C-alpha cells in the first residue's frame, strides 16, 4: 500500500490488534522476514520481561517434571480438507 511505497526501507508493519505483516519480492522472503522479526521480538521479550506473561499459568502443570508436552493424542485433531470418501 501507500505506506510501503512511501517507506521503501520498511519490510513490515505491526498493526495493533491485527498482527504482523511483512512483504518482500517472494513468498520465501516474506516468510524469512516474519521469522526474523518474531525471533528478534522473542529475544527482546526474554531480556525485558521480569515476570511471566499474563500473570503466569492459570493452572498447575500436571505432567511429571522433564517429560515435555503431552502426547498428540490429547491435542485436538483437525485436518483440511476434511476426509471424504468417493463411492463409485
Image (spheres, rainbow, N blue to C red):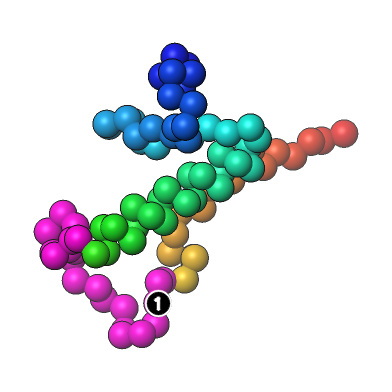
Q: Magenta part of the protein: which range?
A: 48-70
Rendered location of residue 65, percent (x, y): 31, 85
Q: Nearer the viewer, residue 21 or 58?
A: 21
Give above or below for 24 relative to 52: above
* Residue 17, horizontal then vertical, whole percent: 27, 32
Residue extending farthest to the right is: 88
Residue extending farthest bottom: 65
* Magenta stretch contains residue 57: yes
> Residue at coordinates 74% horizontally, 39% vertically from top-left?
85
Residue drawn at x 31%, y 78% is 63
User: Which residue is the site of mark 1?
Assistant: 68
Among the 4 quarters of the image, the one containing residue 54: bottom left
Q: Quadrant of residue 25?
A: top right
Q: Residues within 10 Å of mark 1 (few under 14, many from 20)?
A: few
Q: Residue at x 51, y 44 (%)?
A: 33
Is residue 73 rendered to the left or right of residue 18?
right
Question: Which residue: 48% across, 18% down?
Answer: 5
User: Quick one: SS at disc 1?
Assistant: loop
Q: Is residue 13 above or below residue 73?
A: above
Q: Where does residue 34 sit, x and y in percent of width and height?
A: 48, 44
Q: Is residue 74 visible?
A: yes
Amino acid at each position: 500500500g501507500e505506506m510501503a511505497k512511501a517507506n521503501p526501507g520498511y519490510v513490515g508493519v505491526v498493526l495493533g490488534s491485527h498482527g504482523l505483516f511483512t512483504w518482500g519480492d517472494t513468498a520465501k522472503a516474506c516468510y524469512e522476514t516474519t521469522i526474523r522479526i518474531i525471533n528478534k521480538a522473542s529475544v527482546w521479550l526474554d531480556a525485558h520481561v521480569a515476570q511471566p506473561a499474563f500473570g503466569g499459568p492459570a493452572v498447575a502443570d500436571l505432567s511429571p517434571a522433564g517429560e515435555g508436552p503431552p502426547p498428540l493424542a490429547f491435542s485436538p485433531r483437525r485436518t483440511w480438507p476434511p476426509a471424504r470418501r468417493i463411492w463409485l
